[in-house]
Image: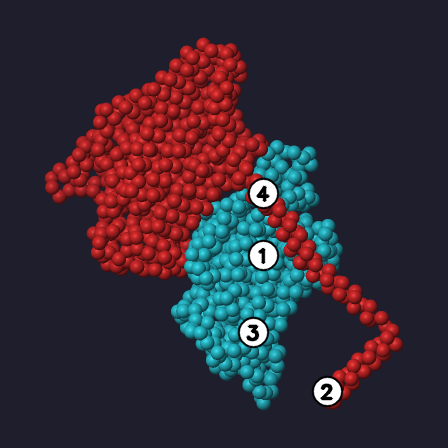
Amino acid sequence: MSFFDNHLLNLVVFLPLLFAALVLVLPASEAGQIRTVTLIGMLVDAVFGVWAYMRYVPGGPEFQLEYRVPWFEMFGTSYHIGVDGLAVSLLLLTVFLGPLVVMASTTYISHRIKEFHLALLVLQTTMLGALVSLDVLLFYIFFEAMLIPMYLMVGVWGAEDRQMAAVKFFLYTLAGSLLMLVAIIAVYFISAPAGSRSFDYAAIYNGLLDANRQLSACAAGPEGACDSLTGLARTLYTWGPWLFGAFALAFAIKVPMWPVHTWLPDAHVQAPVAGSMILAGVMLKMGTFGFWRFAIPFFPVATQGARPFLAVLSVIGIVYGALMCLAQRDIKKLIAYSSVSHLGYCMLGILAVTAEGATGSAYQMLNHGVSTGALFLLFGFLYERRHTRLMADFGGIAKVMPMFTTAFLIITFSSVAVPGTNGFIGEFLVLLGTFKSDLGAAAGNVHLTAVFGAFATLGVILGAAYMLWMVQKVFFGGLTHRENQHLPDLSLREGVTVLPFLILVLVMGLMPQPFLDRINPSTERFLARARVGTPGATVDPSQVRVEVMSLPSKQTAAAPSAPVPLAAVPSTRQ
Amino acid sequence: MTLADFFQVAPVPPEQLAPSLWLIIALPLLGAFVCGVFGRMLGRANVHLVALSAVAGAFVLSVLAFWATSHTGPGSVEGSRRLLAFYRNPFGIEADFVRYALTYDYGTWFAVGDFRVNFGLAVDHLSGILLLVITGVGFLIHLYSTSYMEHDDGYWRFFAYLNLFVAAMLTLVLADNLVLLFVGWEGVGMASYLLIGFWYTDPAKAWAGRKAFVTNRIGDFAFLIGTFLLVLLVSAFTRQANTADYAHAGSSAERYVSSLQEKGPVTFKGLEKMAEALVDRGTDQVDLTTPIEAGPLAGYTFGGVMTTALLLFLLGAAGKSAQLPLYVWLPDAMAGPTPVSALIHAATMVTAGVYLFSRMSALLVLSPTAMATVAIIGALTSLLAALIAFAQDDIKKVLAYSTVSQLGIMFMGVGMGIFWAAVLHLVTHAFFKACLFLGAGSVMHGNGDETDIKKLGGLRHEMKWTWGTFLVATLAITGIVPLSGFFSKDAIFHGVHHNHLHGLEWTSSLVYYLGLLIAACTAFYMTRLYLLTFEGPRSKEARVEHAHESAWQMTLPLVVLAVLSVVAAVYAFPLMRSAADGRPQPIFENFLSPVFGAMNRITEGAKTVELDHSVPSFVDYLKAWLVALTGGVSAAFLYLRFFPARVGQPAPAFARAARRAAQNKFYVDELYELIVIRPVKFMSFILFRVVDALLIDTVAVRGTAWVTARVGSALRYVQSGDAQAYAAVMALALLGGVAYALIQVLQ
């Protein structure tokens, strides 16, 4: 057991924080040094992140690279981290974006440079932490901590209306997550009897599992089958939908699903290029990730009831988001609304509860991070040159910025899911999964499935319509504004920043299987757990239970007479 | 070695060539990459060299692949020969061989759950002939472009896009499954978008590119849903089929299911087997009328879902092949450089729909409804486009509508089950229409980019090569006897007339007589185009005094294509004998028979379509020839005698109204604008203003904030800091409590 076996994830998560400490001691006037140190930190972190991704064995146990030590045992919590296939994929996306975000901000940010880079590094740690947390309370802490640096980023380095956007972003998301905190605590109390309570993901999930099975049986059973429920199942029967609602609302705001999406356009429009990239690239995925990891597995029966409703919201999100794009004059707002549409696909794929849908959804999360991240990045370059976001202020700039145009077009094709680019794989799988799903049956009529699918597929047309419309307005036609006549093309630094995105668009489009292989095992487990709530579904029991490492025996610091740790029942595997 | 031996033995045997099939796609792709990334550094001549050699290399490989599909070795008996180009059908029984074909599977592209798509490439006679057309005509057009684009600074971009297009188109025809086909399908759409908007500084041209892409996307929307339905159908089929079903199709449950796991549900071979099994033979479990038991399609019949899927594919094909209701993008696509129009919008990309239906012929013949719809859509589109072409004065617009019209004829053939003739017409049309477009390009090049035929004229003496080749191609498309267009078109009409769809017999005559009308119209507008451009005196409004003939890079492709449009007629001659019953059979029908084997077996079993294999008689030929002649002669009369004699006299009102309507394309674009585009734009605007900005953001979100703030400020008044007021409240509360307690006690 080398150091890295135990601590690889710790390194990935906390390296940015370490470099933040380094940046902290640098003098604020040394802008170049601060940027370099931050960039190096992000690069080193990326190296370790890629290493972690490589070390994840697709056929192995669910959670890998686990690390667990006691931490606030009186609450039944522990410092427990580990990754499954989805988390490690999103982790890869996060560390991939890290250095590029720093490079994108080199000239964009001109004041409070030190604070900005501190915020970036702290944000990186919190996002990575949320992805790897296997303790629900730990997850919540990271999930909330994320808001602070992002709030500062929008509020301090944003555009003209930054204060309003920052406050709106903060309150909107906080409102949802506070409800979730209540739900987390409630789940903590009900999932186990007093004395063995724990915030650990596995403990809570396994604690609720039996009750969920009973509930599912009663939902499928004859009239009155639910009257004989006892204990936890009874509680879940009454309160499960509410608890699920609290989780779902918090994550739905984060995704964002229609109709709780209105913070996103404002935040994106006002945020600096780094903020937009991270927001679109990683933070939105916390919502979908939350549904996948927490909301749906914890409450499969409530999910089953809410699935048609949520799927309708997702489909509305897809079509509505695309229609919104057609009504925009502001380029950043258009890209923000296109995120609403794309995340609608992610949610629909998860809610389809089919292998194709869920894997496609996870892949779409990565794609969206790459393509929308790149769109914001490229637009950031343009904004630096012209300081305007309106389409009407551009036109014909393909003539003066050919390389920039080429890059933007490739990313556009990825965003509208042209086959051969990454977008196609995700969208195709999500739509196929929707068509194969039992969403129609859950909504009361099997044939509704095709209706869900057909409406979602409309996004294919609308996506092309709005993206190419924007491209047309900005890049083609004559040079209508004198200010645009001497715009410089991509500089070397900008080119180097964009290039990884372009490469990834093609690599993920042509060779998706290595990525899918890591997602697939997580998909299967997710499906099994979600299907616990589907009446009459056959569920492979070996896929359902969450198996994690147990809390290591007490360190020497603990008194020998201390009571048995609350979280860990003394067995090797829970 | 005799000549026959030479042609029957491929230079590279199939088993050696198959693993290298990917090179056919990779070469143009590499060319696109080099030209696109390093083009400006390389300079014009090097870009030409790279682009041309990439396509030439693909052409050579295509020839080798095509050759390999007929590779034979010495047979067991002295002098006999044995076919060596075959592979085992993975979905069939052990002894089920796909003959005259080679295939190679490069492994998984993506696999999730029980869905999988492989990088599988296959060459059979259908895709082989298309490979030759794409790379051959593609090479000629690349050569032509070197001269045509000689004054354009974006030459490197142009050749990069052109190579990219060729690569995508080759992917489309080489794919052995629907999803990989879709890669090419959208890839050609993307390349076409880039090339139509090549001169992007003109907003109209850039808009035309976007219109093409979005219209195609409407088709792709249907294509995707059709694909999903087929995936569902395959899974329903494997769930419900019994041994007899599989046995009828020449397969077994184990082989079929295990091949599905290996190759995925959307391979053409697998779909073909399912189609064969769906034929009702009495002892089977599933046929077209069987209801699906489980899944999202539960309750629908196999046949119903199949028809729906095929109709969706028809919409998809209508997008790509410019048929009703999605043909509107093609005329606008003429905004692109002329070689692009020749390659993409005449010879190759737009025929993708015909290729798709030929590839899926086994499925199509299961549904007479879908077939009739295909044929009728084709006939109506063809007629409409021909009528519009009557009144267009732009040389490229006339050719564009003529392309739409000819594609309609191919759809008629496909819809009525005469697949080989449709494919033959695809090939001959590629020759003569590419020749026409390139001729038009040559005319424009020599006349200062003039496209209005009213301002040309008299070019016969000034551009001899262009004139000669244009004349040959015009005669070919018009359908004058010894040229290829006559035979391929007549083969379609003959088949349309004699094939019958079960339950929908009336379509045969309807489509046939419409077809004759279309043939006359074609002759009319093509003759008009030719006469106005090349005959008569030079127009007084001409841009340049004297047109100049183009360089050899432009005339050589014209000559080659003109020759091809003559000699391709040979394919339609009934020189072969049918393998089944020894009747005379056109060469091309015989040549494509291995491709359409499953289709033929299904039509014999299912009786959904009655296919006629007779050869047109002399009388049939005469009829068709007379029809074409009528159209041509009336155009000649009108434009050489009638109109010149009436110069200065106003035309009657009805004639002017009809002409105006046709000139404005019967206002179809305006209609779409009114019923689709504007409502969508309006709805998005209203939704944004009312739902997003007002209801959600202002009322719900800011409303919550506002209410919170109001409640807060209201409560502020309670916290006055006045100790007496607090004491009063306390006293009152205490009093109330006491009173309540007293009441409780007293009760």
CA gap, disc 1 and disc 4:
20 Å
Within 10 Å of the Cα at label 1, are there few (<14), some (14-19), or many (20+) other Cα atoms?
Answer: many
Residue A204 vs residue B400, the one in the foreground: B400
Q: Which residue is mark 4?
A: B681
Q: Chain of mark 1?
A: A
Q: Are marks 3 and 1 in contact (CB under 8 Å)?
A: no
Amino acid type, residue under disc 4 in the picture:
Lys
Q: Left or right: B703 with respect to A212?
A: right
Within 10 Å of the Cα at label 2, are there few (<14), some (14-19), or many (20+) other Cα atoms?
Answer: few
Name the quadrant containing residue B590.
Answer: top left
Q: Which residue is mark 1?
A: A258
CA gap, disc 1 and disc 2:
52 Å
Q: Which residue is mark 3?
A: A239
Q: Nearer the viewer, mark 4 or mark 2?
A: 2
Q: Left or right: A513 with respect to B570?
A: right
* Residue displayed at 46% across by 33% down: B330
x, y (%) of residue B592?
A: 26, 38
Q: Chain of mark 4?
A: B
| Residue A147 in sight | yes
- What chain is colored red? B
- What chain is colored cyan? A
Tell me how the rendering is colored.
by chain
x, y (%) of residue A300?
A: 49, 69
Q: Are marks 3 and 4 in contact (CB under 8 Å)?
A: no
CA gap, disc 2 and disc 3:
35 Å
Q: Which residue is mark 2?
A: B744
